[in-house]
Image (cartoon, helix red, strand yellow):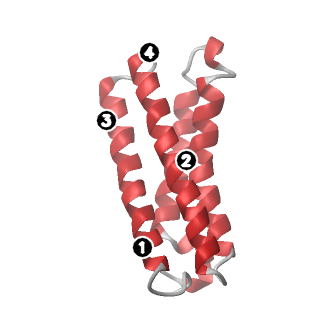
Amino acid sequence: MDSEKGFRGLTTYQKAYELVKEIYKLSRKLPDDEKYNINTQIKRAATSIPLNIAEGYGRKESNAEYKRFLIIAKGSNNELQVLLELCKDFSYITEEKYIQLIARSDEIGRMISGLIASCRDKKPNT
């Protein structure tokens, strides 16, 4: 990781950011009657992941604070997975698209867990 790039240099952040863009594309295809339900929630959950990674990184003087924001990001990732499952079950997305997005979300979740584990051992900016 290039420390000059800050949180943007974190692969976890980069992957989460790319997933947000994919979720926004998906949200445009949801039915109009989901505008204030799943549509809003899925965008908020997805967006919360990189936002919390970035905010936590900005508080890197405290491993406890950084870890807290990473835990929130992980929770948002879990929320996103439930919303994707609902989209699949309501036939808003195909099984194939669901599997693809869940795989990306799972990878991000594992990466966030790795960042959380690293908070126990060293400062977040190393």
Distance CA(mark 3)–CA(mark 4): 15 Å
Distance CA(mark 1)–CA(mark 3): 27 Å
Q: Identify the image quadrant of residue 86.
A: top left
Label 1 vs label 3, nearer the camera: 1
In the rendered view, tell whether residue 76 sits above or below residue 24. Answer: below
Distance CA(mark 2)–CA(mark 3): 18 Å
In the rendered view, tell whether residue 11 sits above or below residue 18. Answer: below
Determine the secondary structure under disc 4: loop
Determine the secondary structure under disc 1: helix
Of the image marks 1 and 3, the number of the one nearer the N terminus: 3
- 65 left or right, relative to 95: right
Q: Position of residue 13 (x, y in %)?
A: 53, 63
The residue tagged 4 is 90
Query: Dot 3 surroundings within 10 Å: few (below 14), some, or many (20 or more)?
Result: some
The residue tagged 2 is 76
Distance CA(mark 4)–CA(mark 2): 21 Å
Of the image marks 3 and 4, the number of the one nearer the N terminus: 4
Label 4 vs label 2, nearer the camera: 2
Distance CA(mark 1)–CA(mark 4): 36 Å
Q: Position of residue 90 (x, y in %)?
A: 44, 15
Identify which amino acid the numbered label 2 is placed on: Ser
Distance CA(mark 2)–CA(mark 1): 18 Å
Identify which amino acid the numbered label 1 is placed on: Ala
Of the image marks 1 and 4, the number of the one nearer the N terminus: 4
The residue tagged 1 is 117
Q: Position of residue 69 (x, y in %)?
A: 61, 63
Q: Position of residue 116 (x, y in %)?
A: 47, 70
Residue 99 is tagged as: 3
